[in-house]
Amino acid sequence: MMRPLSLRFGLLVCLISMILSFSCSRSAETDFTLRVGIPNGPVTLDTRLATDSYGIMISRLIGDGLFKLTPNFEVVPNLVESYEQPSETIYIFRIREGVKFHNGLPLTAEDVEYTYKSILGSELNSPFKGAFDRVKAMEVLSPTSIRIELKEPYAPFLTVLGIGIVPKKTASEMGEGFGTAPVGTGPYKLIRFVSDSIVELEANAEYYGEIPKTRKLTFDVIKDDNVRILKLMKGEIDLVQNGIPPMLIDKILEDPAIKMKSDTSVVVTYLGFNLSDPILKNGLVRGAIAHAIDRDAIIGHRFKGLAVKANSILAPENWAYNSELRGYDFDPSQAKRMLDEAGFPDPDGDGPGKRFVIVYKTSTVKERIDIAQMIAHQLGDVGIGVRVEPYEWGKFYGDIRKGNFQMYSLSWSLLTEPDMFYDICHTSQLAPKGVNRNRYSDPEVDDLVLLGRVTMDRARRKEIYARVQQILLQDLPYLPLWYEKNVVLYRDNLIGVTLRPDGDLHTLVGVEKKKR
């Protein structure tokens, strides 16, 4: 039986107080391993396959791509020394010389060609195949030069090339096993990967860029937010980024050994609806759900000012964000009217009787369960019965990827390029083949996201994606809930801790751990 939230909160505060009282007796740090607590382990570390946030971020610490994004979301060369673009559809890339994979093999243009061809092939079944489907031809011109021709102009092409390059020989020999033992050219090399337990990395001493300040970096999977915090305070881990119970922050910071930073974020939490579901395929029902949720109350109670309401999957920091969007106000009366109109009247006519019941899937992280229960309670007030079903991350995310759900909540943390609307909204990308998990299909959106891909002028692209966001807010395949601010808590012997709006973990490269 789950304890009431107030009791669990009280017990946790007591534990924190006990840790604070014994803080003076902590043993000194003697190693130079940076330990980071994360809520979910990567599904795969193959950069060509990873779609979950930690899978993407950690795999790209291991494997560099030809290009990378700056904290301001500008695309800059990474493994590329230089490039030229003779036309809108032709690119010639010159690869950095002297770069080696972690196993000692030299990086060549053949590895670049192999990486992209494997993504396009049917054997790998990469979710990024759609991002490369505009490639017409690739030609290796020399060991350090490759020519890529597109079928038509593709505005986000350089952003797409952030996917890590894999060694042809190693990846082809390992096959599916590459996802658990990847080799790349990045600032860290993989030492150990135990699914849902730990990812252990070691600094790449031969890295061509900034060499990590700490010799080892480990990601410890600690699913419970509160347990992660307790481990941080006891010195068992050094840093926790996001997934921090806001109501505990003031108490945690009573410990002088714990520091905090927070900043704006592009991380958006949303509700996803299965549009093939007999109930949720009705747009009036989805609109009623939007009006029935009091986001201000949830943000005030659960986030203590560390979140703001969202009207789009894109964040205001994104150049393509539509600032004219007006979201759904909290209006239970309107929600009830919409449910009546949708053909789901109040069964007894005198109160919030259950009009129907839907299943709300979420992870087993306590904070996410608490939020799901708050939303379920609010929906119950307008007559929507909700059964909250928490699952361990692997099962939960697997069901979402396959489209096996009615309603769920998740967060997107790496939405920096508006072309992602193609992946999550275009009819050709329906799950399980693609990442259009909600089975959304709209002819105008299909046309617009394709137009956005071939339009090279940024101002015109902004207009296109403004219209896409407007349609999506009306159709509601996803209901944007809020943008959670990036928050990092860390031990005071760490130097150089910073945050990026996208929450990317490359910031850890510059973190130094001092002896106590």
Image (spheres, grey):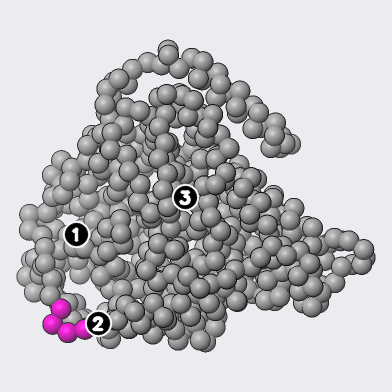
Residue at the spot 20% in from the left edge and 52% down from the top edge: 185
The quadrant in which residue 135 appears is bottom left
Asked if residue 211 lies left or right of residue 7, the reply is: left
Magenta highlight: main SS:
strand
Q: Which stretch is magenta?
A: 85-89
Q: Is residue 433 above or below residue 210?
A: below
Q: Which residue is mark 1?
A: 78
- Residue 316 x/y as whole percent: 44, 63
- Residue 270 x/y as whole percent: 56, 60
- Residue kind at label 2, given as amino acid type: Leu
Quadrant the N terminus occupies: top right
Residue at the spot 65% in from the left edge and 28% down from the top edge: 10
Disc number for residue 150: 2
Taking the view exactly as shown, the residue that stands out farthest to the top is 25
Q: Which residue is mark 3?
A: 485
- Residue kind at label 1, given as amino acid type: Asn
Q: Residues within 10 Å of mark 3 (few under 14, many from 20)?
A: many
Q: CA distance from mark 1 to mark 2?
A: 21 Å
Asked if residue 12 lies left or right of residue 83, the reply is: right
